[in-house]
Image: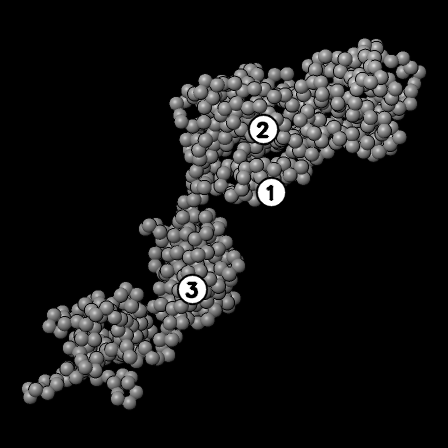
Amino acid sequence: MTDHDQQPSTSVPPRLLIEKTHNGENTTAQRLAMNRTGSFEWDVEAGTLDMDDAGLLVFGLNPQTFDSRPETVLGRLEPSERTRLDVAIDEAIESGRSSYSVHFRVPMDDGRDQWTHIQARILRSEGGRAHRIIGVVQDATAEVTHSAFVLDLEKRRQRQTSIVERTTSALSRAVTVDDVTAALTGPGGLARLGADGLSLGLVENTTLSAIALSGDSVEAIDALGEAGLDRRFPLADTVLSGRPRFLTSVPALTRRYPVLAPCADRLKFRAAAYLPLVAQARSLGTLALFYRENTTFNADERNLCLGLAAIVAQSVQRAKLFDEEREFATGLQSAMLPRRIQEIEGGEIAVRYHAAWSGRQVGGDWYDVIGLPKNRFGIVVGDVQGHDTHAAAIMGQLRIALRAYAAEGHPPSTVLARASRFLAELDTDRFATCAYAQVDLASGTVRVVRAGHFGPLIRHIDGRVGSPQVRGGLPLGISTDFLDEEFPETRLDLVPGETLVLYTDGLVEEPGADIDAGVQTLINEVSAGPASAHALADHLSERLWERWGSGDDVALLVLRRSPDPGSPRAPRLHQYIHQADPEGLSDARTIVRQALTDWEMAELADDAELVTGELLVNVLLHTEGGAVLTLEVLPEPVRRVRLSVQDRSSAWPRRRSPGETATSGRGLLLLDAVATRWGIEPRGEGKAVWCEIGPSTPSAATPPPAAKQGCRHS
């Protein structure tokens, strides 16, 4: 070292001689120790290191106990700094250079880090083999601290820290393997990695497949996308060897992998790092990073690449485990649900099942469609408590049991009572909720029971959605434990063109919101959705399940009774008016007027609207259920309107003679005055009052006998 520039001379004597004096003056070793500069001689072939006292003091070693082993000196360094020194020496020896210079940190006993500088010359044999290295070592803390080297080093380390932090943050949100590849290849992926291209290959059985390519990637070239486990290709070679490959030029790449030589002129990068992905001692694949700018891959850069590979490996392993568990869970669930839904006459059924994205946390939601005698069928959705394989196992048993009880022909209330008893006898602490309905599309009759579950929604042909009041019992299992196996049955009427929706709570549970708000959102989406059952099911899945997230399972069943539009010459509409719907009567009158206007029969709208209100008021006031309104055109022989109101009461109206001050009793008188013909017909469990409005015919001059019986309801 010269006093002029405080830098070691490039010409280093083979050995700094240590002169000893006996007159009390400082020895050369003492002077060097004060200057923190020493010398060494390393016999590469013998593996011994001769270092003077001053040099040993620079490393904080005791000259009296030093064993002349290079490992003793290297043992003083942190792993990262040791790697830095090893890489610098290896690159100098392998490249044929005659010298090297490297800075690194040495932790001292007093807790501080000392910057140390080694400058050495490599002595080679005639064949070019390095056999001896001589050089100087000095404490360069003061020099380095105030030099541009530190600033550049800190800048590079900040960049490397940023790369690691951003990559870790992006991959921490990756759940599946697809998420991992999206994080690596999506917007900002390469920038996060500090690379210009990447290729990710994963091992599946005995095949290596490139599953992610981005930017300047050699594997993106035709025919090199999937090289398999062929060591001629760098991805496979890295997997099989388990060692990283750092290639600093395209010629170096093609020399090592000649199979790539034909496409060398098409490569856009200059350097590549092929990094094995290893997690828990298992080789998962390879990550290749490509760089346009020439790089020597110093120790920091190599450590950065290896660190990125470790982060990606952990993410891939976690994602593969999740995908495997997800596949297991969905396979288990699908095996316990119906493989095929039967086609029904007079309508269409659509079912959708969405599993929660929570690994192996299998849910207990289910749906089913059960064929019954006399062209009827049962529909059910349910939910077993819990999100685990036990809940799924109970779900499978309960679904089969409920199906068996329904197929035996029992009424809906008995089906649920027996299903509750079955669940209680399984000796489990789980309960289940469900809604079951027995449907006859020929008549439109729907008999519904529910056990602690949501009731159905019904969308009318005008788009309005009702939530009929369906009485319910306790959840299955709990009802038996409490000796309360009562499941009241509620009858609903599904007119042609109307749609019934059954669902589980995953469809209406919005995180952080009240369940009633979720139900109201579902009602809005059912109203706004398409008419077809399958299209509506898809609409609800997209708008709600994907909107709320994937925290819970969803079972959804949509049943639509086929519409009955009549013919162009004789159109027809049906509408169900719920007894508890205060706006139903007004809406029905509006629908009748609008339909007649659309059918170019507006001249009959006033009379038809008046009769509609009268007949519906009778039903809603004097019976215990709702009414089905049917409006149709009779084209022959004279084009008239036929209006029918059906209810569930078996009592027929009778004619009365109201006094002048009576407020009721004029209903049949009004029919006589307005209708061309009218009458009463039995309909299953109830009756239908009908009338025809329009031009009269000779055959309609005398009213039917039913009209002469009087009306006790009007």
Q: Residue 158 is drawn in which quadrant? A: bottom left
Residue 645 in the image: x percent, y percent? 76, 21
Task: Name the residue carrying label 2.
Answer: 455
Discs 1, 2 touching: Cβ within 8 Å? no
Q: Residue 381 is drawn in which quadrant? A: top right
Residue 590 in the image: x percent, y percent? 78, 32
With 193 as the anchor, is 548 left or right in this view? right
Return the residue found at the far front. 661
> Can residue 703 be spotted in the picture?
yes
Residue 574 in the image: x percent, y percent? 74, 27
Nearer the N terminus, badge 3 or badge 1?
3
Residue kind at label 3, given as amino acid type: Ser
Towards the viewer: 710 or 68 = 710
Residue kind at label 1, given as amino acid type: Arg
Q: Residue at x 27, y 83 (%)?
A: 8
Decide: few, some or many residues near mark 1? Use Cα within 10 Å; few <14, some 14-19, many ≥20. Answer: some
Give the alpha-carbon distance from disc 3 to disc 1, as whole Å: 38 Å
With 459 as the anchor, is 33 left or right in this view? left
Residue kind at label 2, given as amino acid type: Gly
Q: Is mark 3 on a helix, strand or loop?
A: helix
> Residue 162 bears which disc, if any?
3
Residue 540 in the image: x percent, y percent? 61, 39
Instruction: Report the coloring of the rendering.
Output: one colour
Viewer-nearest of labels 2 and 3? 2
Towards the viewer: 380 or 374 = 380
Return the residue found at the far right. 698
Viewer-nearest of labels 1 and 2? 2
Towards the viewer: 486 or 241 = 486
Q: Which residue is drawn at 40% across and 59% down?
A: 308
Give above or below for 238 relative to 25.
Answer: above
Give above or below for 43 relative to 289.
Answer: below
Towards the viewer: 217 or 590 = 590
